[in-house]
Image: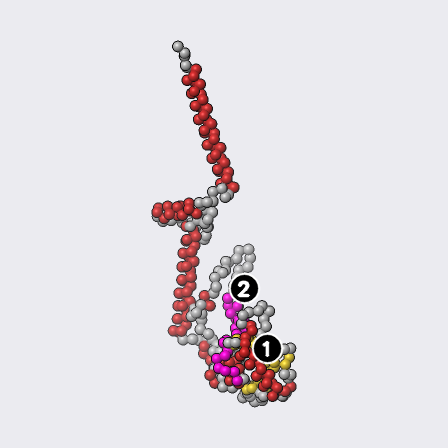
């Protein structure tokens, strides 16, 4: 078994922190895990990057409580100096839940005619609307990463300095010390509990289904109302949006008059904006000139008739 001093103190700008893993009944041999720490320098700078620490090769059983205990209790940082811990695996899970394209449906019909898939977000993401969880604790992928956000840059630098000191003195830090007692157990107990959670009580399952159906009904009713408004209200150009379900006019005459008045007010100041409006204006002007010309011809004819009928004494 290699010793803790076998690994270098730093690699590629990362400080190597040695964690001692406690022996297990199935593997009663002490082992070491190497955690790599460096100031967070994302490709796209953020306002919190200067006070963040980037971790690589996070232990698979790491939680927010583990990271806070490691830095605050075991590395001597004052309590309350860690603002938050972001695991990269949790971020990827959230993106996969929000983006349906990352989880394409398997029952989609192939061919020229395809079913329309709703673009609305899945209702399962709403609080209380999903099925009960079947795992009592999340695990991190092997070699995963995390970002620790501190309240200020001084706290981040203090942790990094203490990690270098621990590594230089050859001290080993016992991982999960004082934390695992407060978390669900791993090993066979985890899978026994998982089997129990796969079959929740009827009351819990009924509450989850009712919440889901209520959210679905509210979203469906809201969509129907929005489509009804689009079918009745013309847009700025005077066109009615054609939507599924046909077009229905206002139910009462006063509503129709109100819509017509509203549309007329919208069109104020838009005369002559479109080419067909200019053509209509020119046609109306030419017709008005032709009518006046005919009226003038009739007046001249009458005047000539009166002049020809005049007989001097």
Q: Position of residue 257 (x, y in %)?
A: 37, 46
Q: Which residue is mark 2?
A: 101
Q: Position of residue 294 (x, y in %)?
A: 46, 26
Q: Which residue is mark 1?
A: 38
Image point 55% across, 88% down: which residue? 23
Residue 216 seen in this snapshot: yes
Where disc 1 sits, the SS reads: strand
Label 1 crowd bin: few (<14), some (14–19), many (20+), radius 10 Å: many
Image point 44% across, 71% down: which residue? 131
- Does the magenta portion include 75? no
Image point 36% across, 48% down: which residue? 255
Q: Nearer the viewer, residue 7 or 210?
A: 7
**Rendered position, 44 above or below 293:** below
Q: State which region is magenta.
A: 76-99
Q: Position of residue 43 (x, y in %)?
A: 60, 69
Label 2 crowd bin: few (<14), some (14–19), many (20+), radius 10 Å: few
Q: Along the polypeptide, which appears first: circle 1 or circle 2? A: 1
């Amino acid at each position: 078994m290699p010793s803790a001093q076998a690994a270098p103190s730093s690699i590629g700008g990362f400080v190597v922190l040695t964690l001692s893993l406690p022996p297990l009944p199935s593997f009663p041999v002490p082992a070491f895990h190497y955690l790599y720490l460096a100031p967070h320098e994302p490709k796209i700078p953020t306002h919190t990057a200067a006070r963040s620490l980037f971790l690589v090769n996070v232990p698979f059983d790491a939680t927010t409580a583990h990271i806070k205990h490691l830095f605050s209790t075991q590395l001597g940082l004052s309590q309350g100096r860690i603002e938050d811990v972001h695991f990269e695996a949790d971020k990827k899970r959230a993106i996969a839940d929000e983006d349906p394209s990352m989880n394409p449906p398997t029952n989609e019909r192939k061919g020229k005619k395809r079913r329309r898939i709703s673009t609305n977000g899945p209702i399962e993401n709403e609080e209380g609307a999903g099925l009960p969880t079947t795992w009592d604790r999340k695990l991190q992928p092997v070699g995963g990463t995390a970002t620790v956000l501190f309240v200020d840059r001084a706290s981040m630098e203090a942790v990094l300095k203490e990690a270098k000191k621990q590594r230089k003195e050859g001290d080993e830090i016992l991982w999960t010390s004082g934390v695992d007692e407060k978390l669900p157990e791993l090993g066979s107990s985890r899978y026994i509990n998982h089997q129990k959670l796969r079959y929740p009580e009827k009351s819990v399952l009924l509450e989850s289904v009712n919440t889901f159906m209520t959210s679905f009904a509210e979203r469906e009713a809201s969509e129907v109302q929005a489509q009804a408004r689009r079918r009745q209200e013309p847009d700025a150009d005077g066109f009615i949006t054609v939507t599924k379900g046909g077009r229905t006019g206002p139910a009462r005459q006063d509503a129709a008059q109100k819509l017509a008045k509203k549309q007329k007010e919208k069109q104020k100041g838009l005369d002559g904006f479109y080419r067909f409006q200019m053509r209509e204006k020119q046609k109306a002007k030419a017709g008005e000139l032709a009518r006046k010309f005919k009226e003038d011809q009739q007046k001249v004819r009458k005047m000539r008739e009166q002049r020809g009928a005049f007989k001097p004494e």
